[in-house]
Amino acid sequence: MADLPIETIFEILTRVPAKVVGRSRSVCKEWYALLSTRDFIRVHCSRSLVSSNQRVLLIDDLTCSVHPIIFQSYDYGPRSIVTLPFDHQNNDVSILSHLNGLLCVCLNHTNELLLWNPTTTAFKRLSTPDSLGIYINNLDAVGLYADDAHDYKVLHIKRRCGVYESYVYSRELNFWRNIPFLTRQEYLSPNFYWSPGTFCGGTLYFTLCECWVGGTNVVICFDINSEQFKEISFPPVPSTGFVQGVLVNVKNELHMFATTGWFEITIDPWTLKEDYWIKVLSCPPIPPISLSLWGDITHYVTNGNWFVMTKLGKLFTIEMDTKPYEILYPVTWFRGYKGAVFVETVVSPSI
C-alpha cells in the first residue's frame, strides 16, 4: 500500500476494525500521523457504527470480559478477558453512559468519573480537586453526547443538600463549567430516581421516576445546542405498580420501553413524536412477566423485531412490523454483573 495515494489509504483504513487501526499506526510515521487526525477518527467512527462491531462488556467481582453478539441466535460469543487500565477495588466500576465506543464510568470506591475506551484501553479521569466530576449513586445523573463540532461532552446533574446543580465537561477543553438547571422543588426528594442519559437528535433524555406506587414520572430533556432543560410527559402508563422507562435511540428516533406492575410486570413500546409519546400499535399485546424474570432483563436487541434479553439469553420476542436492522440497546446494570453494549472505535477519551 506504500505506493497508493494518501486519499486511497484513508478510504481503506477508515473501513477496517478499530484494533486493525491500532496496529496500523505502528507501520510508519506517515500512517501514525494520518490515523491520529480528527478527520480520520470521525470518519472511521461513523463507518464503525454497525452491528458487527458491537460488543457486550460484562464486569463482575473477578473478571472483566468482552463478548461479540451472534445475531442469528442472540447469544454471546466467546469472551475475551479485559484488564481494567485504571485503579479499582474488586472491579467496583459502574457504567453510566456510552457513545461511539466511549464509556463514562464511575469508580465506586472514590466516586470519580472517567471516560474510557475499552477497545484502545485509553482512559481519562474527569475529577478535579474542587470535587467536580464526583458522582454519587442514586442521587446524580450522567449523560454522554457529542456536539456539532464533534466535541464529546458529559452532562452531570448533581443533587446535593437540597439543591440541584448541573455541569458540562468538554473533552476538547478538559474543563467543567456550571450551567443553569431549573426544575420543580419536589424532584429534589431522594425518592426520585434518574435514569442514565440517552442521546438522540441533539437532545439528552432522562427518565425521572418516583419510587413508589402512583408516584410522579416525567422525562427531562437537555438541548445540547441551547443548553436548556425542559420537562415532557411520561407515556400514559397505568400507575398501579412500579414504573420504569428504558430509553433507546433507534436510528435517531427515541423509543421507550415503559414497564409497570406489581408482582407481574407489563412492557409497552412507545415512540416520541414532537414531545408526545405514541404507542407502537403494530406491537401485539405482550404477556405479563413475573417480577423475578423482569428483574433479570439486561438489554433489548432488534433485527426489526425486538428481543428482551437477560444475562443468560432471550426472554421473549416483541414482534414488530418494521424494517430489519441489527442494533443492541442496553441498560447499564446486569444482575450479578455490570455491563454495557458498545461499538469498537478508536475515539479517544482525551485530546
Image (tube, rainbow, N blue to C red):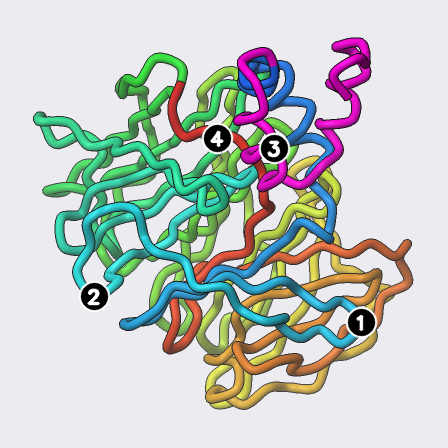
Taking the image as shown, residue 48 lies to the left or right of residue 340, namely right
- Dot 2 or dot 3: first in sequence order is 3
Residue 222: image tag? 4
How far apart are the alpha carbons under marks 3 and 1? 28 Å
Give, as a three-letter code, the residue at label 3.
Val
Image position, residue 193 (x, y; %): 34, 57
Image position, residue 343 (x, y; %): 60, 46
Quarter occupied by the C terminus: top left
Image position, residue 335 (x, y; %): 41, 76
Taking the image as shown, residue 306 lies to the left or right of residue 107, namely right
How far apart are the alpha carbons under marks 1 and 4? 37 Å
Give, as a three-letter code, the residue at label 2.
Asn
Q: Which residues are magenta?
A: 1-30
Residue position for label 2: 90
How far apart are the alpha carbons under marks 3 and 4? 34 Å
- Taking the spot 47% from the left edge, 77% from the top edge, the residue there is 241
Residue 21: image tag? 3
Give, as a three-letter code, the residue at label 4.
Phe
Residue 30: image tag? none
